[in-house]
Amino acid sequence: MEAIKQRIGYIDILKGIGISFVVFGHVTHIDVMREYIWDFHMPLFFWISGMLFNRDKYAGFRSFVAHKVNTIVLPYILFFLITFLYFAFIERHFRGGEFSIPHQLLGLIYGTYEGFHLNFNGALWFLPCLFSVELMFWAISKCKDSWGVAGLLLICFVLATLIRANNLNILPWGIHTALFAVTFYGIGFFSKEHVQQLSTRSGLTAKIFLLIGCLGVQLLCMGKYSSNIGNTTLPYIPLALCGIAVYLIISIFIRSNRLLAFLGKNSIVILAFQEQTYRALIYVVSKMLSIDTEVIRTNIFYCLVITVFTLAVIYPLIYLYNKFARKYLNVFK
């Protein structure tokens, strides 16, 4: 039981680190920082989801889908509607660019950033894509043979590569990205026992050597591959896994941190509201200091401050979501 609590503890910390990187990576326009963060930050969340996958928790496929609709799809719809209304009535009046209101609203159904359907809140692409990944892996996991599962994951990777090569990255609900992201989900699923051994049995020296080695690979390969989850170049997978390993080990070392664990437990709310929040903060700071927004976004000090304030401003929204919204989203049994 204690091992389970410890596992959940460092996974929440890892998610907290990950969502902090997501916010900072969106705030900053410093190329080297974005390249480093984008090499692993979204694969990290698919990997974590795979590691937490447990088919035995559900009575069957219907129960599984109901749970995922309650925890992914309904929050997505809620976050979409709230941030869309904010965009339609407030943000679009001071934000640059041409955005068609009907086209953005269509994003609720289409559920992907490609085609510019989610320009007002691009980060929401993750939730429909994650839902697609969950359904894919449920089907894949019906295969009881580990090599069979690995083979099906390879087929998904090949399909994702073909889709990307033929510029068909426009499938609804991020299916084109999900075919690739399910690879990280599957690796996370197969990593369960190894991660538990790493956290409980591996010595300090082994952890440090692994951390240094993976960090070295990250730094040596940084900028050599397209830094996003839609990149199906084969070397991107081990590069992203090295980034995941670095911060997994750091999370195991930390063991307990209430702030990071809080951020991790509420990462879905932070993901949903961070773009509107940091854009508003950047706008206010640029007006107050009479400096261009790009100056703010290419200065590491400003980026760190904006990131911290973004997380702080979202705190009341986290409280409201947990206090009022979450219980009403548990619709399907």
Image: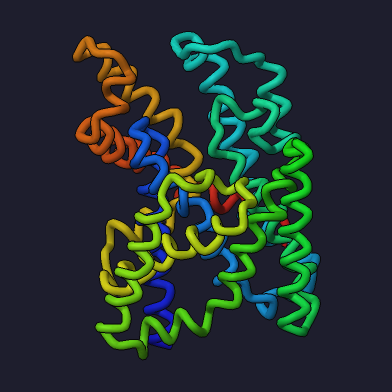
Q: Position of residue 147 (x, y in %)?
A: 73, 81
Q: Quadrant of the N terminus?
A: bottom left
Q: Quadrant of the C terminus?
A: bottom right
95 relative to 318, above or below: above
Q: Nearer the viewer, residue 99 or 66?
A: 99
Q: Residue at x 68, y 80 (%)?
A: 56
Q: Residue at x 53, y 14 (%)?
A: 89
- Specify the quadrant of the image occupied by residue 211: bottom left
150 relative to 238, above or below: below
The furthest residue to the bottom = 201
Residue 330, visible in the rendered structure: no
331 relative to 79, above or below: below
Q: Is residue 193 left or right of residue 53?
A: left
Q: Position of residue 102 (x, y in %)?
A: 71, 17
- Specify the quadrant of the image occupied by residue 120: top right
Residue 80, visible in the rendered structure: yes
Q: Residue at x 45, y 32 (%)?
A: 275
- Specify the quadrant of the image occupied by residue 291: top left
Q: Residue at x 44, y 64 (%)?
A: 242
Q: Position of residue 99 (x, y in %)?
A: 61, 15
Q: Nearer the viewer, residue 109 or 235?
A: 235
Q: Is residue 161 left or right of residue 27?
A: right
331 relative to 195, above or below: above
Q: Position of residue 76 (x, y in %)?
A: 62, 42
